[in-house]
């Protein structure tokens, strides 16, 4: 089966249908084993990932699946998957702690690449598991929220910019001191808890920037959101200002800066 954007949307809807009754429920937070992404998997994480695997198997898809819980797994015929270079990069539930607590900010995200690099990602879907809103994009075709085309905001640092900040606990106070001059330039700081959704918030113009200094940030957290942001006219780059284009792997982790176009130069200068 050919992987298209409608198929990816349907998979995320399948996840929504299965996990939405569990949001905010004690059953959702039951602990399981530690997933390939490094975090302890919760019941709701496993359920979401199983829905994705079952959806792919039912559709007879041949692909390499890179997912937070199982790591890397070939679905269908491995040889065909290697030949067609299909790769799906999935976070079955981004914002698990929010989901378990009933905080309405979590998502399922799926990116489809044909090739082995981040730049080979062709289409992406992020679904808000509380609202069922779907952010999606296809390479060189723009980005959308449901049926409406979206674009990053045109605010610059002199205006009321919102941004999210994600810092590692190690050296937290030191990092905050370094960032204080920058933080003072922004109108509001948010810490929301779903990387994929925050990238989509920037893509749709609801926020202006995301500074994520956590070196533990995983590829599965950002793969779909990266394409959606880029197709909406946004920017995402490494801490030294260079393009992020690493090999697709469950082991890839990196900090990043994401923003609208008007803040790119300012952020590169301040954080360089």
Image (spheres, grey):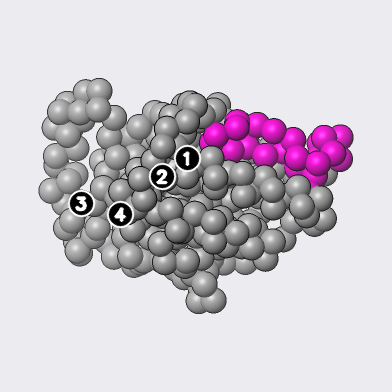
- The residue most toward the bottom is 148
Q: Specify start and end residues of the magenta stretch as a single range.
A: 61-82
Q: Is residue 233 left or right of residue 54?
A: left
Q: Is residue 73 left or right of residue 238?
A: right
Q: How many angstroms separate mark 2 from mark 1 (CA)?
A: 7 Å
Provide residue 232's location: percent of width, then percent of height. Answer: 49, 63
Q: Is residue 271 left or right of residue 260?
A: left
Tell me whether circle 3 and circle 4 mark residues in contact (CB < 8 Å): no
Q: Is 161 above or below relative to 246?
A: below
Of label 1 and label 3, which has the lower sequence position? 1
Of label 2 and label 1, which has the lower sequence position? 2
Q: Nearer the viewer, mark 3 or mark 4?
A: 4
Provide residue 115's location: percent of width, then percent of height. Answer: 72, 41
- Secondary-structure class at tag 2: helix
Residue beneath disc 3: 189
Tell me whether circle 2 and circle 1 mark residues in contact (CB < 8 Å): yes
Q: How many angstroms separate mark 1 from mark 4 (CA)?
A: 17 Å
Disc 4 crowd rating (10 Å Cα; few below 14, some 14-19, many 20+) is some
Of label 2 and label 4, which has the lower sequence position? 2
Tell me whether circle 1 and circle 3 mark residues in contact (CB < 8 Å): no
Residue 137: name its quadrant: bottom right
Q: Name the residue rendered at 54%, 45% in the picture.
A: 47
- Secondary-structure class at tag 4: loop
Residue 141: name its quadrant: bottom right
- Is residue 152 visible in the rendered structure shown here? no
Residue beneath disc 1: 43
Instruction: Based on the picture, tell me whether residue 237 belongs to the magenta stretch.
Output: no
Of label 3 and label 4, which has the lower sequence position? 4
- Secondary-structure class at tag 1: helix
Residue beneath disc 2: 27
């Amino acid at each position: 089966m050919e992987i298209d954007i409608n198929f990816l949307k349907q998979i995320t809807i399948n996840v929504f249908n299965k996990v939405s009754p569990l949001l905010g429920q004690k059953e959702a937070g039951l602990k399981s084993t530690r997933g390939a992404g490094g975090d302890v998997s919760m019941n709701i994480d496993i359920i979401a990932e199983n829905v994705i695997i079952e959806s792919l198997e039912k559709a007879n898809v041949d692909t390499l699946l890179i997912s937070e819980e199982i790591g890397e797994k070939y679905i269908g015929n491995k040889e065909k998957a290697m030949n067609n270079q299909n790769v799906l990069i999935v976070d079955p539930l981004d914002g698990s702690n929010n989901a378990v607590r009933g905080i309405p900010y979590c998502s399922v995200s799926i990116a489809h690449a044909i090739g082995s690099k981040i730049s080979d990602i062709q289409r992406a879907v992020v679904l808000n598991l509380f609202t069922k809103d779907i952010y999606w994009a296809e390479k060189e075709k723009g980005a959308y929220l449901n049926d409406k085309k979206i674009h990053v905001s045109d605010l610059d640092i002199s205006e009321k910019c919102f941004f999210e900040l994600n810092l590692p606990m190690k050296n937290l106070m030191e990092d905050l001191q370094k960032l204080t001059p920058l933080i003072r330039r922004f109108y509001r700081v948010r810490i929301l808890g779903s990387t994929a959704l925050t990238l989509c918030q920037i893509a749709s113009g609801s926020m202006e920037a995301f500074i994520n200094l956590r070196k533990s940030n995983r590829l599965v957290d950002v793969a779909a959101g990266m394409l959606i942001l880029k197709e909406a006219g946004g920017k995402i780059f490494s801490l030294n200002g260079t393009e992020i284009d690493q090999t697709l792997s469950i082991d890839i982790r990196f900090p990043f800066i994401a923003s609208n176009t008007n803040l790119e130069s300012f952020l590169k200068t301040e954080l360089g």
